[in-house]
Amino acid sequence: MSEPIERVAVQVDRLCWTGILLGLAFTMTNVQQFAAAGAPAWSLAWSAAWLLDPMVSLVLLAILRAEQVTARHGIRMGGWVRAAKWFTLGATYVMNTWSAYAAGSAALVVLHSVPPLVVFVATEAVTDLRDKLGSGAVAFTAVPVEPPASPSLPKKPANPRTSFADYLAVAKAARTPDVTVTPAWVREVTECSRGLSSRLAAALNAEVQP
């Protein structure tokens, strides 16, 4: 069972990261247009604008990868790490949607909001998915520990219509030389009725008498 789970975990990890990278690539063009602010193509300002989104995205990817690795070992990241992740995600969203909000176009707002929001939810989900799938693989591969075998004891009659001879056989099997046969002891080992226990005790005691 461990191989299919590990294979699925790798596939899920790769698909999530592919979606994140495609989303960041889409946002890069919007951020470039936002940063260029209408500068002529291939000008210094236009070329430098291409550096803004990769600068933010690389920091975000580094944080996400570190979170994924540390989560596997149960290590919690500090507040600055989460603040940096949320800030980079927020900055990406604001730079992508600023022009759409300024234009007052609902369609453009939706169009430019979906990719950064997909990146946002995927970054939160990918670490948890990998951790849960890894835990599932460990659970399936865990070797069950069998309880120690209990010493073989004579079975007590479970049928209420068990005969006197059957009860007597069970009591004989459970009796040891150091046992004092009493009706209470007979009831304990055979679970018979109180009236029958007296007869069984008398029969057992009669057998040991000379």
Image: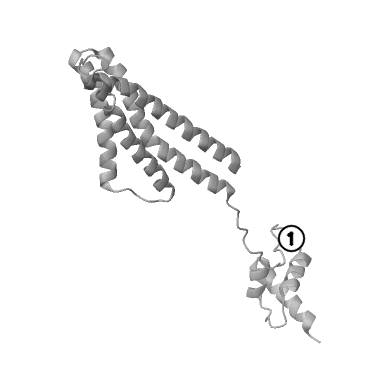
Q: Is residue 68 left or right of residue 146?
A: left
The residue labelled by disc 1 is 162
- Above or below — where is 172 with respect to 108? below
Q: Quadrant of residue 48?
A: top left
Residue drawn at point x = 21 percent, y = 17 percent: 99
Q: Residues within 10 Å of mark 1 (few under 14, many from 20)?
A: few
- Above or below — where is 166 with respect to 84? below
Q: Is 141 in front, or is 192?
A: 141
For the view shown, which residue lies furthest in the bottom direction?
A: 210
Q: Is residue 180 left or right of residue 82?
A: right
Measured as percent of width and height from the top left, residue 179 is found at 68, 80
Residue drawn at point x = 72 percent, y = 58 percent: 161
Q: Quadrant of residue 60?
A: top left
Task: Quarter of the image for the N terminus: give it.
Answer: top right
Callout 1: SS: loop
Measured as percent of width and height from the top left, residue 159 is found at 70, 57
Q: Amino acid at mark 1?
A: Thr
Measured as percent of width and height from the top left, residue 154 is found at 72, 66
Residue drawn at point x = 28 percent, y = 20 percent: 30
- State how the image is colored: one colour
- Above or below — where is 147 with respect to 141? below
Residue drawn at point x = 21 percent, y = 21 percent: 45
Task: Quarter of the image for the C terminus: give it.
Answer: bottom right
For the view shown, which residue lies furthest in the left direction?
A: 102
